[in-house]
């Protein structure tokens, strides 16, 4: 008999239902899954990660050889928008231990990921969903919006959550319902779920070694469900990672600590506490010109020559981050329920760089090296116009290496309150999200030839190129209802009111060089409606219409020094789709149409290296997506997805940059009841353009051809009943190979620079070379 992968009715005690809601409720609410669907994700006991969910226990034997279980990603039947759920089972078995959330989701439809230094070994440089850039979609952690930098909402993929911190990842390619909170939900939501405690007391030691001199070791400790504490459970994990990286002289090291406590306070209320701390050091390449790739190879990164602006010892960053929350969920009786999360997170970076890392050499026309005007063009290679002062003293500089030291420190803190009331078979929901982010950032000029001494171009001038502080306040109250007029149909109408205020106090503004002390508020009413209908058990269809909104990035706001003249980005999203799931087949498809107004895009100025935002008017995003896994038998499944994507400006008809025209994935998965696992998945990313011109024609620039890569994973888990020593519970062995066919295609634009003749030339990212990563884990 085929298994239904939809609704499952719970019969557990009330305390277990409350704990389950604590673990899943906020994530479900933020991604548009109904409360009923959240309850249907039966945990069975206090632990949220059962052996069945992880794919290692005997209780999962009946499910292992099914399409939904083996699928690299699949669409849950309860959703109201296109969604791809990547399970913890897939992350553990197919993603290298060094990987981050971007590695987990890179095979999902309409997604492209540029990670030039190897899996998780540096920030992902470009992550797009349907052509939406980082900053145009939402990222949440356990239902909490993770803003990234408050200035532009960009995220840092390699300095927060490690692979061992993450339980599952869900990619929602839509704005969600009114209860979906965040600063840029119109482009979708990447929902990270924290790893949950194991059911039994466990000590798990793990290590991984592989290409690029990568080494990881760590320990996870689980308390199991403690009956004396009313079923409370704790997980704590610490890991340390070092790597030279694929790119030359691009080494990194990383330490990460994570803890989660889930504690029922009584039969109606449960408390969840989560904390993560991360400490990272990275050498930071900034891309390579075509000439550098031709001369030094695709792995060109940084230099060992102290006279180069790309010298590795003067191009690095230190990062300290944390993310914490306290969550409380309670069944108040009579159909009432509350869910509250109080949270904070922070990012602190100090970066050291050459002024123009891959720019023209000293003594050439396009050089940016520091050369005093008293020396003239014969020495400098260009006509110098400046004098230089080191510590206030006029000093003659002869092609000294210019650099900068930048610092950013921000902290976000806020609260999410949700209230629900069951009304017959339906449910009324309301709530509010509030967040305040404070951000201090600065950059000052240094002379690396003089040991990093600061310099100015006048006796009384400032070495700072910018010195700023800004605040971002966000509030989003909402109300919606899961209305069930007939069996199998759920209609969710709702409305959200978004209020965003930016305030800046700059001694030296980044774009104008002048003081700035201004603020502006943007407000928008955001209606949404979605519906999900069960056509038959295991087959649903859905539709969604929603309005989206995003406040302008800070740099766009103050490019001309006029805050009030810049309007917010607005969208209308329309999409319909369907999902089918049986033991044999997990299949889904959708079509979408998104109408943009006040579209902003960013480029990097080739001379100043400042980010420049351009308001491009309107844009239309539209496309079709299909995803499926078919169980072939004999423990083998075939996986495939594909998308046709179009993103064009309405005024000019030119393509939006960094928006691939199509994507596809194809692979095989093997997973049997004995503990053997294997996957081979290839990804195709279609052609795109690197950037748009800032001129009125918005011309497409720097064409990037289509490219492919494939990843291989094999592993074996030996469990206690299969003969491991009595004092052990489990031994896991795996080998993961990234970029199996060693494809070195150009995959993204890193920016632009000036060559020796002062011409603007592009900087490129390439696929990292083939990587082998072996791992072993031992559970006690």
Image (cartoon, rainbow, N blue to C red):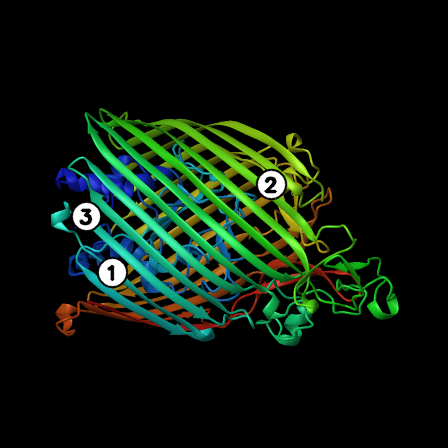
Task: Name the one closer to the observer, 581 or 159.
Answer: 159
Label whose residue precedes the other's in the sequence (2 or 1): 1
User: Circle 3 sits on which residue?
Assistant: 232
User: Circle 2 sits on which residue?
Assistant: 554
**Mark 2: which secondary structure?**
helix
**Mark 3: which secondary structure?**
loop
Per the model, the C-alpha gap separating discs 2 and 1 is: 42 Å
User: Circle 1 sits on which residue?
Assistant: 221
Mark 3 crowdedness (10 Å alpha carbons): few <14, some 14-19, many ≥20:
many
- The image shows residue 646 at horizontal and vertical percentages of 56, 46
- The image shows residue 303 at horizontal and vertical percentages of 62, 72
State which quadrant residue 771 falls in. Answer: bottom left
Mark 1 crowdedness (10 Å alpha carbons): few <14, some 14-19, many ≥20:
many
State which quadrant residue 310 falls in. Answer: bottom right
State which quadrant residue 629 falls in. Answer: bottom left
Marks 3,2: beta carbons within 8 A? no
């Amino acid at each position: 008999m085929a298994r239904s992968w939809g609704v499952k009715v719970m019969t557990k005690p009330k305390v277990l239902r409350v704990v389950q809601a604590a673990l899943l409720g906020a994530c479900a609410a933020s991604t548009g899954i109904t409360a009923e669907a959240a309850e249907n994700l039966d945990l069975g006991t206090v632990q949220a990660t059962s052996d069945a969910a992880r794919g290692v226990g005997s209780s999962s034997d009946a499910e292992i050889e099914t399409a939904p279980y083996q699928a690299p990603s699949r669409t849950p039947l309860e959703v109201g928008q296109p969604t791809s759920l990547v399970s913890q089972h897939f992350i553990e078995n197919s993603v290298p231990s060094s990987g981050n959330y971007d590695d987990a989701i890179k095979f999902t439809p309409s997604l492209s990921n540029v990670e030039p230094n190897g899996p998780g070994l540096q920030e992902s440089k470009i992550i797009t969903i349907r052509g939406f850039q980082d900053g145009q979609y939402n990222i949440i952690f356990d239902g909490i919006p993770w803003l990234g930098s408050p200035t532009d909402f960009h995220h840092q993929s390699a300095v927060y959550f490690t692979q061992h911190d993450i339980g599952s990842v869900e990619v929602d390619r839509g704005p969600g319902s009114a209860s979906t909170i965040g600063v840029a939900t119109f482009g979708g939501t990447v929902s990270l779920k924290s790893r949950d405690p194991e059911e039994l007391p466990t000590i798990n030691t793990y290590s991984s070694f592989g290409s690029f001199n990568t080494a990881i070791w760590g320990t996870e400790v689980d308390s199991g469900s403690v009956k004396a504490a009313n079923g409370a459970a704790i997980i704590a994990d610490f890991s340390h990672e070092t790597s030279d990286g694929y790119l030359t002289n691009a080494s990194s090291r990383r330490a990460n600590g994570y803890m989660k406590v889930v504690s029922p306070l009584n039969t109606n209320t449960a408390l969840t506490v989560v904390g993560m701390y991360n400490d990272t050091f990275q050498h930071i390449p900034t891309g390579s010109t075509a000439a550098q790739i031709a001369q030094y190879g695709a792995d060109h990164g940084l230099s060992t020559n102290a006279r180069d602006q790309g010298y590795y010892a003067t191009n690095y960053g230190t990062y300290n981050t944390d993310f914490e929350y306290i969550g409380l969920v309670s069944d108040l009786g009579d159909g009432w329920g509350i869910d509250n999360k109080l949270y904070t997170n922070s990012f602190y970076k100090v970066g050291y760089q050459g002024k123009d890392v891959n720019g023209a050499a000293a003594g050439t026309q396009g050089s940016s090296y520091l050369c005093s005007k008293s020396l003239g063009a014969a020495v400098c290679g260009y006509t110098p116009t400046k004098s230089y002062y080191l510590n206030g003293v006029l000093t003659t500089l002869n092609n000294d290496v210019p650099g900068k030291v930048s610092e950013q420190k921000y902290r976000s803190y806020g609260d999410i309150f949700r209230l629900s009331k069951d009304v017959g078979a339906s449910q009324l929901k309301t709530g509010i999200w509030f967040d305040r982010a404070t951000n201090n950032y600065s950059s000052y000029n240094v002379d690396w030839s003089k040991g990093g001494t600061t310099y100015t171009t006048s006796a009384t001038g400032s070495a700072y190129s910018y010195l700023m502080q800004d605040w971002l306040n966000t509030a989003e109250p909402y109300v919606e209802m899961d209305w069930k007029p007939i069996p199998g149909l759920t209609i969710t109408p709702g409305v959200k009111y978004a209020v965003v205020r930016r305030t800046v106090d700059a001694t030296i503004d980044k774009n104008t060089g002048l003081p700035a002390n201004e603020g502006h508020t943007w407000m928008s009413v955001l209606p949404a409606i979605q519906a999900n209908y069960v056509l038959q058990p295991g087959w649903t269809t859905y539709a969604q219409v929603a309005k989206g909104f995003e406040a302008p990035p800070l740099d766009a706001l103050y490019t001309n020094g006029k805050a009030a003249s810049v309007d917010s980005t607005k969208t209308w999203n329309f999409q319909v789709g369907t999902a089918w799931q049986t033991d044999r087949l997990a299949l889904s498809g959708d079509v979408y149409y998104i109408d943009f107004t006040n579209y902003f895009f960013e480029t990097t100025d080739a001379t100043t290296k400042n980010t420049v935002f351009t308001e491009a008017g309107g844009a239309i995003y539209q496309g079709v997506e299909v995803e499926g896994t078919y169980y072939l038998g004999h423990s083998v499944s075939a996986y495939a997805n594909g998308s046709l994507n179009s993103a064009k400006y309405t005024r000019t008809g030119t393509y939006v940059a960094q928006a691939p025209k199509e994507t596809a994935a194809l692979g095989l998965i093997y997973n049997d009841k004995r503990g053997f696992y294997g996957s081979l998945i290839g990804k195709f990313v279609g052609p795109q353009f690197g950037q748009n011109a800032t001129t009125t024609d918005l011309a497409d620039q720097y064409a990037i051809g289509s490219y492919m890569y494939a990843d291989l994973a094999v592993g074996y888990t030996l469990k206690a009943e299969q003969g491991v020593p009595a004092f052990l519970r489990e031994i896991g062995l795996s080998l993961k190979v990234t970029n199996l066919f060693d494809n070195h295609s150009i995959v993204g634009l890193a920016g632009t620079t000036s060559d020796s003749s002062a011409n603007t030339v592009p900087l490129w990212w390439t696929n990292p070379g083939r990587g082998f990563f072996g791992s072993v884990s031992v559970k006690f």
